[in-house]
Amino acid sequence: MTHTEAAAGPTFVRSDYVILGGGALAVVLAALTHYRGAGEILPFVFAAVAVTMLASLVGRSVEQLGDRFGPGATGVLQSALGNLPELFIALFALKAGLVGVVQAALVGSILANLLLVLGLAFVVGGLKHGPQNLDSKRAQSIIVLMVLSVAAMVVPSIAHYVHVPVSKHESAFSIFTSVILLLVFAVTLPASLKRGAESEAETVDMQQEQPRWPVWLAVGLLALAAVLAAFVSDWFVAALEPAMTALNISEAFAGLVVVAIAGNAIENVVGVQLAAAGRSEYAFSVVINSPMQIALVLAPALVILSHVFGFTALTLVFSPMLVISLVIAVILTAFITFDGESTWAEGVSLIAVYAVIAASFWWG
């Protein structure tokens, strides 16, 4: 902590009060409805809101910590720690035997970012600033790594359906693939942490716009949010099955849409805000980094942890429709990126594709 920070004390903006106050209220209501009982719907709703608010608090705390080390570190920390609520939800779901929900949630998180959030960013940024420029080496390198990561993640599924000898060993092949993906993340991590001249300018702009918290406050709130996220995720999963039955929602739809959107609150908000501020390439980087982290870290980590903890085993063998949906999302995003420019009409189209895919899983 610097002398200036110590003297000035913590400085909050209006959104910080909303996150802190709303998060505290949501956690209290989630706890009350979980332990005292309040039907089948309210515990699920309050737990989902609490997960979303805690994810936002994690993101804000990481942002305050990361700007001391550069935007590269900020992006990596935000993507990694921002997935904490989703990691906890997935682990508790696997403990409860809800493998279908977890697989759908992993794919749904990628789809939500590539189609829904990116589409919203294009619409908001396009209507406010006109066509947005994505023609940069950094944007192209990010999308290439994302495409390769997702491609590697779906290979076990393809092998299961078209290569009979592998289909009998899907668990072992999933573990092997998971180790490879984690190694790729470790190898590419140093490059992600590098600070370029363009990123340096973005950091200065962000620091000028947003007041900074003392380090002790950012670390303390981050630790508190992580602990609370573990409890709230347990309550969320406990309320999930009764809510699915009451609302007649399938496992696939619950994972693909509800769990995925609740666990990705940070990218849902930050990406659109950056696009509205005219930082189209930075918004694209934030949104795309999340699915890349899911493919390289979250999914393989869950595969390995499910075996380590003795939960219901998770594999990287997804249903054919989930695989096809992933391929569609990746191809569309790659085309838009390498075109070098995005418009609000392309954003509307991405959102429409997401809506159609999500609707297709309503029945299972």
Image (spheres, grey):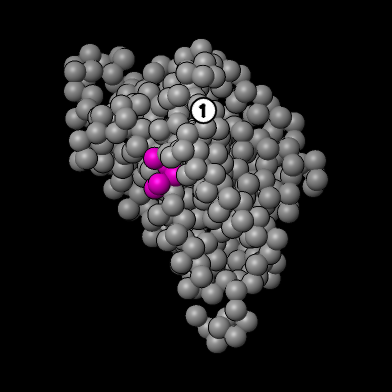
Is 317 part of what is drawn in magenta? no
Occupied quadrant, residue 41: top right
At x 58% / y 63%, what residue is drawn? 199
Q: Name the main secondary structure of what is drawn in magenta.
A: helix
* Amino acid type, residue under disc 1 in the picture: Gly
Residue 260, x across and y down, in percent? 50, 34
Compared with 269, 73 (above or below) is below
Circle 1 — which element? Answer: loop
The magenta segment is 230-234
Compared with 62, 144 (above or below) is above
Between 311 and 352, which is closer to the camera in this rendering?
311
Residue 79 visible in image: no
Residue 92, x across and y down, in percent? 34, 37
Between 247 and 282, which is closer to the camera in this rendering?
247
Residue 303 visible in image: yes
Residue 230, x across and y down, in percent? 39, 47
Q: Residues within 10 Å of mark 1 (few under 14, many from 20)?
A: some
